[in-house]
Amino acid sequence: RTVYLNGAYVPEEEAKVSVFDRGFLFADGVYEVTAVLDGKIAEFEGHVARLKRSLGELGMSMPVDSDELLAIHHELIKRNNLQEGAIYLQVTRGAADRDFVFPKEATQTLVLFTQAKDLTSEKAGIKVISIPDIRWGRRDIKTVQLLAPSMGKMMAKAEGKDDAWMVEDGFVTEGTSNNAYIVTKNGKIITRNLSNSILHGITRAAVLRLAAELDMEIEERPFTIAEAQDAAEAFITAATIFVCPVVEIDGAAINNGVPGPISKRLNDVYIEEAR
Ligand code: PDD
């Protein structure tokens, strides 16, 4: 693969970052993952807006402007002949002698790479477990501090399941790397309202817009695992999975263990629009 590092396109083996990089030492950096479908970038503006916001919340600015970022995305798609998959982007505060205090002068590290992935084949639906949400209080910032979600996913795998929904004060916050939804028996889509407790998913915003256009009813509020287990349907969204049905929650089958019609419809409509 050809990757992008600080202004240069280089073979991945040659892309080197300092051991003093604050992304490495402090997880002092943010990231974005954007889907590529038929060589086209999905929801680019949304991802850039969130990147700007994440950086701003950590006292950083954009390393390059939005137009240049778009050009880098296009160049990487071309150089790697990416048809379907993801582009990963990371910005860190850069390299400086180790100190908790932010360095006065450091040059940000900007890295982008592609990952070829099948994003569009029919989804069987995933099984989730619930786990306590042990992450920090600023989950609205997309930082590279991902050990809690990574451990959560491992706990699910250890039980033979696919993913975990994280619970705080009795309510689901989100999935380890996705937003969580249920559909009530009378067809209303429920997903947690935006706050510092969850990541403001770009796919979430797009799917809620599409659902409203389809005259589906939406309610943004927290829900419990018990309510989810009793729901007609459940699903998750993220940039690289679009709308993925959830067919089991803590051992309880949802929609008899098969993907429900609303999650399927939203996934189809999302892909149709992205193509
Ligand atoms: N994860 N919530 C969390 C905690 C996430 O990490 C993600 C994305 C989402 C969905 O956001 P979006 O729709 O903007 O992708 C929600 C990415 C895909 C990842 O870490 O790989």
Image (cartoon, grey):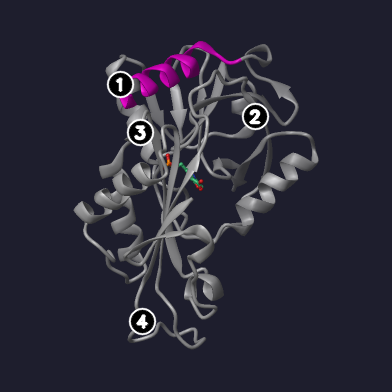
- Dot 3 corresponds to which residue? 39
Question: Residue beneath label 4, please?
Answer: 106
Q: Residues within 10 Å of mark 1 (few under 14, many from 20)?
A: few
Magenta: main secondary structure equals helix
Q: Quadrant of residue 74?
A: top left
Mark in the foreground, 2 or 4: 4
In terms of secondary structure, where does tag 3 sit? Answer: loop
Q: Which mark is residue 226?
A: 2
122 part of magenta stretch: no
How far, Cα to Cα, is label 2 from label 1? 26 Å
Q: Amino acid at mark 1?
A: Ala
Relative image position of residue 190 (x, y in whole percent)? 46, 27
> Which one is nearer the viewer's eye here, 25 or 163?
25
Q: Are marks 2 and 1 in contact (CB under 8 Å)?
A: no
Q: Which residue appears at 32% of the width and 71% of the height?
A: 59
- Tell me the crowding category of disc 4: few under 14, some 14 to 19, or many 20 or more residues within 10 angstroms, Cα based: some
